[in-house]
Amino acid sequence: MEKMSWIVSSQDVDALALQSYSRKEKSLGVLVSNFMKLYNRDDVDLFGIDEAAAKLGVERRRIYDVVNILESIGVVARKGKSLYSWNGFVHIPRSLLQLKEEGLREGFGLSTICSNSHKVSHDGSDESDDSLSLPPHDQHKSSSLSTMDHKKERSLWLLSQNFVKMFLCSHDEIITLDTAAKALLNDSQDSVQMKTKVRRLYDIANVLSSMELIEKTHIPGTRKPAYKWLGSKSLIEKGSTLFNSTDESKKRVFGTEITNLSTKRNKTDCSSNYVLQTGYKKHDEETKPAAKSCYMFGPFSPTAASKKKKNNNVGTIYNGRLQDLEALSSTYKPQYSNQDVTGLLGHYTGSWNKWFAELDRK
DNA sequence: AACTCCCGCCACCCT
DNA sequence: AGGGTGGCGGGAGTT
């Protein structure tokens, strides 16, 4: 229906050339990236589905996908109909810790490489903390047990949590989606179910990758794609290499970030606070005063350039992405950004560090 | 050809 | 009934 109209004049061709439809630009990963940039600021507390969809230029349906996965990690929490609260990155470590405990308790600690048969938790019951629990009104499942449970059992939320638990609890840190799907399917061999489950896992993997919690790689010997958990220290060092262009006293700023967990006021313009920015050359033009209502990329790492090439050679390729900032500003589009996803978490490194240290200790 | 995974139909919940 | 949610899988874009 909207395949993209090819009614163009000869001079539009070039413009269209670099504007042609690209599936990647529409990926969940990019959406999440933009989503983070939109809401990841101190002055954001609540947000609505419609608002998000409008600002990000996507249909509601997609927001549900993003939000459901983010909720599984504690970044957001449903507050009501079409209303979510923004918790932020700082809640992730806590959530992971909790997921790990839960996972171990549920038997996720066993092998995942080969078929295993731990029964995945169907209940949505989590104890203690709030971040991972469903909001109160859902808790008392007064009515239908089977129907609702069945639905929840297949939810992205649960699937995402279980997927993460596999990483947190198992000893192998490389997991293929097939393996995960099979395990989360209680070793069912049904190819149809598998296919569907894998499709979902791709969705989840995309957003987790975008959040840099996992990374796509290959299984050592083969060419078989798989995902690797980045959490903990890997993430930290990566975070630091991401902005090594100009060190400075950046970390100081974020060290305090953890303390303003409850800081919802303080509606300052982020541009002055973000260390990231110091790493790159200044990029004014975006310093407009009342910019809170519109969607901008300004304060965040522009990132760019796919981080990995086909070969799984390592080789820190996190350099030369400075000029992208300029590129970004000129290619600014109201809807989707065509940038790649990376380096979103830079300024959270400091706080994460502490949490992850705690996580590991656990 | 295999791998990805976007897109949006439509079954389910709630009001 | 009406509208918000979100499972699900066809099939198109990528590798």
Image (cartoon, coloured by chain):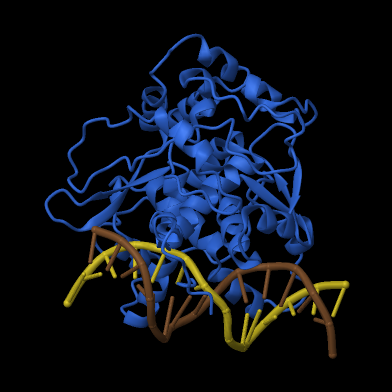
Chain colours: A blue, B yellow, C brown
The answer to whether any part of residue A294 appears in the image is yes
Q: Nearer the viewer, residue A129 or A37?
A: A37
Where residue A336 appears, as percent x and y from the top left, is 54, 53
Residue under the point 51% across and 15% down: A251
The residue drawn where x is 66% and y is 44% is A295
Seen in the image, is A357 located left or right of residue A89?
left
* Location of residue A185 by image quarter: bottom left
Q: Quadrant of residue A256?
A: top right
Q: Residue lying furthest left in this view? A: A221
Choose between A143 and A92: the one closer to the eye.
Answer: A92
Residue most extreme to the front: A10
Q: Where residue A16 sits: x, y (%)?
A: 43, 59
Q: Return the residue nearer the eye: C9 or A139.
A: C9
Which image quarter: residue A112?
bottom left
Q: Residue at x 20, y 52 (%)?
A: A219
Give left or right: position of B6 versus B9.
Answer: left
Residue A273 on image: x %, y %? 63, 20
Question: Which residue occupies 40% across, 54% down?
Answer: A18
Residue A162 appearing in the image: no
Q: Is A325 drawn above or below residue A129 in the view shown?
A: above
